[in-house]
Amino acid sequence: MGSEPKAKRQAVFFDRDGTLNVDTDYLHRPEDFRWMPDAIPAIRCLNERGILVVVVTNQSGVARGYYPEEDIMRLHAWMNEELEKEGAHIDAFFYCPHHPEAKLAQYRKNCACRKPDTGMVDEACEKFGIERNRSCLIGDAARDMECAQRAGLQGVLYTGGSLLAAVQAALEKLPD
């Protein structure tokens, strides 16, 4: 008997800074973190619908020597701890610590994971069996929209206000 093909899953990809949280330039400490309006209910709404929630974020502060990668991982764990208190969670975090003009040599490179390139999205799609035509990327910058387009996702430019409303509007435009 052959194995059945794995069902493709729907996902909403989020940029982090400026989309899920207020962008405070090189955010890496929980005490500096502030959720965007209705971010937690937006994530919970997706969780309740069985839609994967994936964060894809450029973190050049590592390459610039402002903070170590451990700070990013600690902040992401803290975000999920806060979400769990509200009955929500982020399924996966992907980040790019590289920059072509990095201060730290080990992070100085042009890589496929730095948005607008699609490496983080591609890795998530492979890992979780994500169906791109039923998924979207919500972000606050042109590089997020370019990444979405290159990756075959619907791009949703978030310009502020209720993130829950933005998510609901995006879901209405996606095929079932």
Image (tube, grey):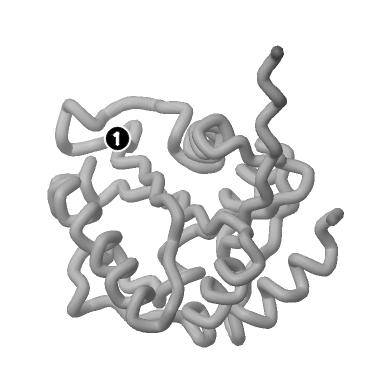
Helix or strand or loop: what does disc 1 sit on? loop
Work out whether residue 38 or residue 111 is closer to the camera in this orientation and state it: 38
Which kind of residue does numbered mark 1 sit on? Answer: Glu
Asked if residue 70 is positioned above or below residue 122 in the image, the reply reads: below
Asked if residue 108 is positioned above or below residue 115 in the image, the reply reads: above
The residue lying at 51 percent from left, 86 percent from top is 37
Say few, some or many: other residues with alpha carbon within 10 Å of mark 1 (under 14 / 14 to 19 / 20 or more).
Answer: some
* Side of 159 relative to 14 (left or right): right
Question: Which residue lies most toward the top here?
Answer: 1
* Side of 172 relative to 142 (left or right): right
| Figure quadrant of the N terminus | top right
Let me know if residue 91 appears in the view: yes
Q: Position of residue 119 (x, y in %)?
A: 50, 32
The residue lying at 73 percent from left, 39 percent from top is 152
* Side of 147 relative to 135 (left or right): left
The residue lying at 70 percent from left, 26 percent from top is 5
Please give the residue where the numbered disc 1 appears in the rendered image. 101
Q: Position of residue 92 (x, y in %)?
A: 42, 50
Let me know if residue 150 appears in the view: no
| Figure quadrant of the C terminus | bottom right
Question: Which residue lies most toward the front here?
Answer: 1
Q: Position of residue 27 (x, y in %)?
A: 27, 66
Work out whether residue 30 or residue 117 is closer to the camera in this orientation and state it: 30
Work out whether residue 32 or residue 45 is closer to the camera in this orientation and state it: 45
Number of marks:
1
Asked if residue 70 is positioned above or below residue 128 in the image, the reply reads: below
